[in-house]
Image (cartoon, rainbow, N blue to C red):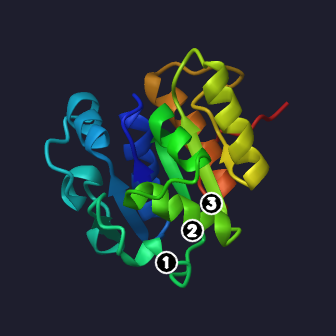
Amino acid sequence: MAITGASGAPYATRLLQLLLGAGVEVHLVISAPGRRLLAEEAGVAEASPAALAPGCDASRLIIHPCQDIGAAIASGSFLTDGMVICPCSSNTLAAVAGGLGDNLITRAAQVTLKERRRLVLVPRETPLSPIEIENMHRLSQAGAILCPACPGFYLKPTRVSDLVDFVVGKVLDLLGVAHGLGTRYQP
């Protein structure tokens, strides 16, 4: 999992909490803008397991430095079920679409694509420029799944956390991780 600098810290922290709660081992990379985002939007001054996922089993959360392109997750021989970038900034979206691997986030994303594993990107920017739309198209063609942070309203949300859970539930579904968020449409 990666956290970049697009506004959306509640999505990232909730997703992390639920992945760990489901027993998933999470390898986390946070960009410098992502660290600033966590501080400003979530009050997480230092990205430690205890601060990012309080009450969760911290032994399943491995945090890697963003510039460590030699980390295990930068290799195709390191088996994963996939990768999610949540939130995904337009800068990171462009770097992944352009095949750049100059930091651990983009390198791990490139490895995920080349190994044909599930790569889910959660862009949160709005409005979208033609360049961003082209980058999304390019990534979709390469096998990535774009899951914009666009909550639905058919479940009649009453709190911000309901909107966050709607998006996080979609991401968990895309990753094949069971959850009980009740975010699926029931006619």
Mark before the other along the chain sequence, 3 or 1 = 1
Q: Using the image, determine if residue 105 lies above or below residue 187.
A: below
Three-letter code, disc 2: Val
Q: Is any atom of residue 89 visible in this view?
A: no
Which quadrant of the figure contains the N terminus? bottom left
Report crowding for label 2: few under 14, some 14 to 19, many 20 or more residues within 10 A (C-alpha): many
- CA distance separating discs 3 and 1: 27 Å
Mark before the other along the chain sequence, 3 or 2 = 2
- Is 86 on the left or on the right of 112, as rendered? left
Q: Using the image, determine if residue 46 lies above or below residue 42.
A: below
- CA distance separating discs 1 and 2: 7 Å
Q: Nearer the viewer, mark 3 or mark 1?
A: 1
Report crowding for label 3: few under 14, some 14 to 19, many 20 or more residues within 10 A (C-alpha): few
Q: Is any atom of residue 77 visible in this view?
A: yes
Residue 75, numbered label = 1
Q: Which of 159 and 42 is in front in this view?
A: 42
Q: Total of numbered circles in the picture?
A: 3
Three-letter code, disc 3: Ala
Residue 111, numbered label = 2
At 25% from the left edge and 42% from the top edge, which residue is drawn?
Answer: 35
